[in-house]
Amino acid sequence: MTKLQPEFYLRDDVVEISIALLGKILVTNIDGKITAGRIVETEAYNGRTDKASHAYGDLRTKRTDVMYREGGRAYVYLCYGVHHLFNVVTTKEGKADAVLIRAVEPLEGEETMLHRRKQKKLINSVTSGPGKLSMALGIHYRYTNESLLNNLIWIEEAPKVQKKLIIADKRIGVDYAEEASDFRWRFYIKDNPYISK
DNA sequence: TTCCCGATTTACT
DNA sequence: GTAAATCGGGAAA
């Protein structure tokens, strides 16, 4: 399989990259276990100008610093003190754009995913949400800033998803972001059972 | 240092 | 349907 290269992440439109990430394969090699899933749901966060983004208003702190770096690395942060949310940092250095991966469809390492999720049976709830997929794939916020060109967390090439199968809708959980909460920057593959609810 | 709260999930009533 | 879990980041003091 072919790992996505810097050119993919360095394109200048985070929304375009969010759409392009649908169908691609997110792979982790953590604790000696390979797990992989097909990306079926994403959300774009448009850096410093997006009220829903952690970098809004040029906010630059220890946590958000990684968003300002060059595309092609992970931004993972702890949400509600419980969940590790995985983002792909995109575009050029200084823009602070990122794509939240909201759901994947398991492809490899299902047993490991179930074990990490403390579930017995493979049903859609194993990876149908941003906190769930991180737990299933073993992604911890200690991996923030990790390069996606290394061999811990990476994304592999896969055929483009047909345009007619891609749905654009409002982002989830960003009601506080005023007009930005209405932007249709959430993208998912139509009828896929692993979409978050 | 204190205080508030979140790009969520799960287990309840 | 509602609420609890749980803790680091960021703002205020």
Image: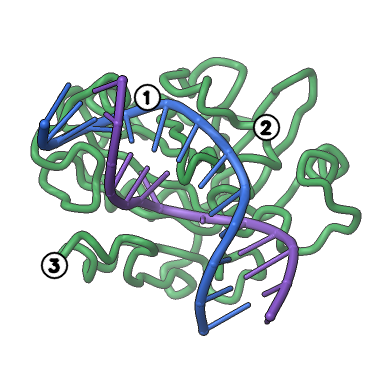
Chain colours: A green, B purple, C blue
Residue type of the residue flagged with mark 1: Pro
Residue type of the residue flagged with mark 2: Gly
Quadrant of the snapshot with the C terminus of chain A? bottom right
- A143 left or right of A169 in image: right
Observer-side mark, 1 or 3, equals: 3
- Residue pictured at 65% horizontal, 29% vertical: A28
Number of marks present in the image shown:
3
Could you confirm whether marks 3 and 2 are on the same chain? yes
Seen in the picture, residue B6 relative to A96 is either above or below; the reply is below
Circle 1 packing at 10 Å, graded few (<14), some (14-19), many (20+), is some
Residue at the disc numbered 3: A179
- Residue pictured at 49% horizontal, 19% vertical: A149
Q: Residue furthest top?
A: A150
Residue at the disc numbered 2: A138
Q: Position of residue C8 (x, y in %)?
A: 42, 26
Q: CA distance from mark 1 to mark 3?
A: 32 Å
Q: Quadrant of residue A54?
A: top left
Disc 1 element: helix
Q: Mark 1 touching mark 3, by CB under 8 A?
A: no
- A153 left or right of A91 in image: right
Circle 2 packing at 10 Å, graded few (<14), some (14-19), many (20+), is many
Q: Residue furthest right?
A: A120
Residue at the disc numbered 1: A6
Q: Position of residue A130 (x, y in %)?
A: 53, 50
